[in-house]
Amino acid sequence: MAEEENKEEETTQEKKKSNTLMIVIIAVLVLIILGAAVTAILLMSDDGSEAQIQQNTPQAQTKTISNRTRGSSDMAESRKLSDIGILYPLDGFTVNLKSDSGSRYLKVTISLELNGEELSIELDNKSPVIRDRIIRILTSKTLEEISSKKGKAKVSQQIMDTLNAMIVDGHIKGIYFTEFVIQ
């Protein structure tokens, strides 16, 4: 009888150990899955959560207004359609992106927001130079630099700054990508 009781106690202890081990394994798996999910969300968010948080504060609203006056293309998304000025469409650009393999290319169509109609005449006259400057900027970028929202905003700002430096009759208020394909 004592032997049977000892065997029953041993099997009960083994069951308890295996149950505890199973609980620990499940807990570790849940933590790994949660960690992977949080990492994926952070990588995919691309600063969108910061923009949403900032838009709700009064300081962010004044920052948005000040950025509009500077012509920031990143803030162009929050502007009303009635606030957008004259648009000057450019022909499409197809360029190779900077990469080791050289197999990536970008096809993009851009429209420039002008502060006045008189600027369109100057842009017509300087069209080859404008296209050259934009092509040089685009070909200097890697896939990683332009694939995110933040990267597109940086490229827009760089194009706008470069073009505004060579314009005399006004300035470009915004850059709009009407087509943006990476392959």
Image: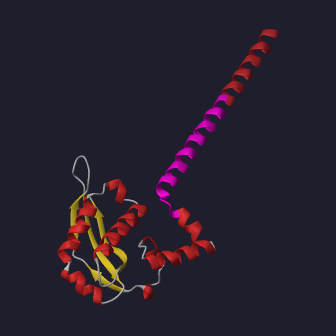
**Residue 16 horizontal side relative to residue 88, left or right:** right
Q: Where 35 sits versus 97, above or below?
A: above
Res 176 quadrant in image: bottom left
**Residue 7 horizontal side relative to residue 78, left or right:** right
Q: Where 27 sits versus 145, above or below?
A: above
Could you tell me what secondary structure mostly forms the magenta stretch? helix
The residue most toward the front is: 168
Q: How many marks?
A: 0
Residue 79 location in percent, x, y? 47, 80
Q: Quadrant of the N terminus?
A: top right
Q: Nearer the viewer, residue 125 or 85?
A: 125
Res 74 quadrant in image: bottom left
**Residue 86 horizontal side relative to residue 98, left or right:** right
Q: Nearer the viewer, residue 183 or 101?
A: 101
Q: Is residue 58 magenta?
A: no
Res 82 quadrant in image: bottom left
Q: Residue at x 61, y 72 (%)?
A: 59
Residue 1 seen from this side: no
Q: Where 2 sits versus 139, above or below?
A: above
Q: Quadrant of the C terminus?
A: bottom left
The residue most toward the right is: 2
Residue range highlighted in magenta: 21-48
Q: Nearer the viewer, residue 147 or 28?
A: 147
Residue 55 location in percent, x, y? 57, 72
Q: Nearer the viewer, residue 5 or 169?
A: 169
Q: Residue at x 51, y 63 (%)?
A: 48
Q: Residue at x 26, y 85 (%)?
A: 120
Q: Is residue 24 magenta?
A: yes
Residue 87 location in percent, x, y? 32, 84
Residue 85 seen from this side: yes
Q: Residue at x 26, y 50 (%)?
A: 99
Residue 2 location in percent, x, y? 82, 10
